Image (tube, grey):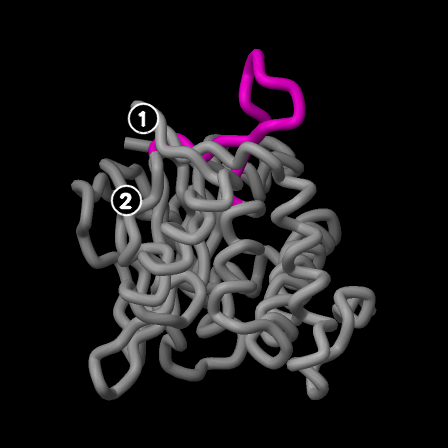
Amino acid sequence: MGDIGDIELFASLGEENAKRFAPAVTWRTYPANELVIDMDDASNDVLFVVSGSVRVIHRADDGKQVILGELGTGSMFGEMAAIDGIPRSASVTTMQTSLIGSMKAAAFMDVLAHEPEVCRTVLNMLVGRIRSLNLQLYEHAYLTASERLYAELLRLSRPRPGHDGQRSISPPPNQQDLAERIGSRREVVSRALRALEKDELVEKTRGALVLTDPGALNRRISLEACGSNSTNKAPMAARPSA
């Protein structure tokens, strides 16, 4: 069982207000791969990941799905339905056993109305998500599936310890997940990864996918996005940043 003090968003609440809003939060531990909220559901609770992680997914009518993002400890989701009252725009499932707090929309809006610091934190979070969506829109408009894959690999990677200049993704992502992240098909991802291996830009090791030359991978995005066969594409500098 959790406590309102475990929710990062409410860290600025004083003791009195924490006690006031604590009864509005209910707690549940979800096993891995459990549906937390479903797309088009009419519920409007706001949910907080106290431990574990979740994946946000949009499913099309034809059954295809796109991974919109992953949220870890300290994250919040479901706030859009709480604010505008419109049914859920995405589904959220757990990636591992997760402790999640749930707050009714009315209580959440009450907190925002009376706690300026909490409200500012929510605004900053929403702006961050809009910037991320701007980038996704740019990539889908101007980059090929292969280029989007390169960009996603760079985003997922972290510096590889003991190997200056290299980055790695551990555990290595499976091809279907990568396809759903970039809005493509597994076969396209498979071909692109094989080409990168042939060019020695990626390497599969035990427990990781290694980007041996991240700079070259990034330049490949820039060059291909501005290439002579891509006359309708904007250069990388045109990425939205407003």
- The disc placed on residue 95 is 2
Question: Which residue range is magenta in the image?
Answer: 156-171
Q: Nearer the viewer, mark 1 or mark 2?
A: 1
CA distance separating discs 1 and 2: 18 Å
Residue 51, how many percent across, how many down?
Answer: 37, 33
Magenta stretch: includes residue 164 = yes
Q: Residue at x 37, y 81 (%)?
A: 87
Residue 150, how many percent across, how many down?
Answer: 54, 54
Q: Residue 139: tell me if it is visible.
A: yes
Residue 190, how many percent across, how many down?
Answer: 32, 57
The residue pinned by badge 1 equals 207
Work out which quarter of the rendered image holds the C terminus and state it. bottom right
- Secondary structure, mark 1, is loop
Q: Nearer the viewer, residue 200 or 77?
A: 200
Work out which quarter of the rendered image holds the N terminus and state it. top left
Side (left or right) of 134 relative to 20: right
Q: Residue at x 80, y 71 (%)?
A: 238
Residue 218, how many percent across, how many down?
Answer: 66, 50
Q: Is residue 30 above or below residue 37?
A: above
Mark 2 crowd level (few <14, some 14–19, many ≥20, 10 Å Cα): some
Q: Residue at x 59, y 28 (%)?
A: 166
